Amino acid sequence: MLSSRLPSCSSGRRFRNLYPCYRSYSSPPTPQHSIYISKSTNPYFNLSFEDWFVLFRHKAPDKPLLLLYRDDSCVVIGRNQNPWKEVNLSALRAREGIPFIRRRSGGGTVYHDLGNTNFSIHLPRTSFDRHLTAQVVLRAVRSLGIDATVNDRNDICVGKEKICWSAYKIVSQRAYHHGTMLISTQLDTLGDLLHNTKDTMETKGVASVRSPVRNLQQFKPTVTHEAFVDAVIHEFREEYEVRAVNDIIGEDNCKDIEYIQDGMLELPSWDWAYGQTPEFTYTVSQAFEWGTVKAKIRSKHGLILDCDLSVSNTDSQVVSMSAVLQDCVNSTDSRLKEVERALQGRKYGFVSAMDILNGNKTGTRVKKDVAFWLESMMNS
C-alpha cells in the first residue's frame, strides 16, 4: 500500500546515479525488470510500447511496472476525443512534421516535445488507486525542491498552474496511470496547437479541461529531464520495494514484438486517428453576397452522416443583386440539396470543393461558394 509520506519541497535531493546499473537494450524486454526507460523519441513507438506494456504476457499481473520516455513534438489526444474539437489543425499543418496521435487511454489532449517527460505507472487492477499513484510522482517533484500539490483531478500543480496532466486505462488484470510532466516544453507552441474556438461543435466524446500551465524550470531552472527521471525511479523503488536494475529499451530490441509493430502502423492510420472519433454535430454559418448559409453537419467515426443546409436573404441583399445573381439564387434550394447529397458518407475534413462539385469547376455561383467554404471550414 502506498504511504502518505511527503518529503519537504526544500530538500532538493538528487538521485542521479543512485541506481547506475542498466541492462543493455540489445535484446527484448524481460520479465526480470520492473523499470523501463525508453531511449526512443518516436511517439508511435513509445505509445505502442506503453500499450503493450499493460498487456505484458510474461509479467505477473501483481508486479508493479514503471515506464519513462520522451517524444518528439506531437499532439496526443485521448481515446474518446474529437481531433477537430481538440486540436488547431490549421496551426498543426503549418508546423511540418508535428502529427496528432490518438492514444489508447482516456483523458484529455496534451502536447509532447523533448521538453517534457512522460511517466507510466502500471499496477494490478485490484490495488490500483489513481489518487495514490499521483503521490509517487508528487513526492518526486517535491524532492526536486518544488512546492507542488495534487488537485482534485489528480493533476500536479504549483499554485493554480498545472505542470502535469494525467490519464488512465484499465485492461484485464492491470491498470495504469500515465502523465506528461512539463519541464522545459515550448509553451507557445503548446498554446497555439491546443487553441480551438469551435464552440458550436457538440461532441459525444470527452472534452479537455483547459488550464493555465507552467514548466518546472520556471520554478527551478536547474531541473532537467534526467533529474526528474531519477527522482521518479527513486520514489517508485521506495514505494514498491523494487530492487531490479533499470532496463533501457528502444525500437531495435522490440522489432520482433508483433503487437508493438502493428500498433506503430495503426496509430497514424485514418481508421484509428479519425475513424475512432465519437459522433458530433457542428453548426456554423457563413454570409455571402447572395445570402447567409447555415450548415448543420453530423458525423460519426469520421464519416459525414448528413448535412442540412439552409439559406436566408436580407431585403438589402436581394435589391442589390444583379439579374444574373438573382437567377442563381432562385435555384438555391436545389443546389444546396446537391451539396448535401455530395457530402453524405464522405470523410469529414477530407472533402475537397471539387469533390462536392463532382469535378465541375463551372458549377453555379451558389454551389461553388458553398463548396469552397465547406472545404475550408471542415479542414480547420
Image (cartoon, helix red, strand yellow):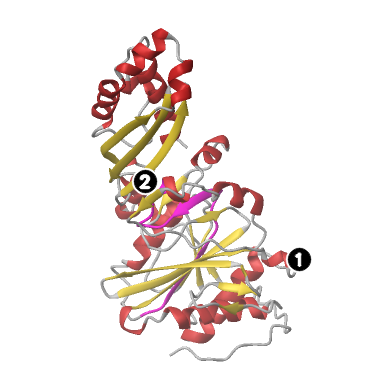
Q: Which residue is mark 2?
A: 273
Which one is closest to the eye, mark 2 or mark 1? 2
Instruction: Point out the residue furthest to the right here.
Output: 221
Of 238 and 292, the residue lying toward us: 292
297 or 113, nearer to the observer: 297
- Say which mark, if any, is on residue 221: 1
What amino acid type is highlighted by mark number 2?
A: Ala
Residue at (70% x, 81% y) in the render: 13
Front-lying residue, 152 or 112: 152
Q: Secondary structure at mark 1?
A: loop
Residue appearing at x 23%, y 34% in the figure: 345
Residue 254 placement (x, y as % from top left): 39, 54
Find the magenta span and give its range.
Answer: 63-83
| 205 sits to left or right of 11 | left
- Which of pointers 2 and 1 lies earlier in the amino acid sequence? 1
Q: Position of residue 278 (x, y in %)?
A: 31, 52
Q: Is residue 266 above or below residue 138?
A: above
From the viewer's perspective, tell me whether residue 46 is left or right of residue 202. right
Judge from the rendering whether residue 135 lies leftward or rightward of residue 223; answer left or right.
left
Q: Is residue 151 magenta?
A: no
In this view, 84 is above or below 318: below
Instruction: Kindly indicate the quadrant of the structure image that contains residue 173.
Output: bottom left
Label 1 Cα crowd, 10 Å radius (few <14 / some 14-19 / many 20+): few
> Where residue 145 sits in the image (x, y, percent)?
71, 78
Quadrant the N terminus occupies: bottom left
Q: Is residue 94 above or below residue 178?
A: above
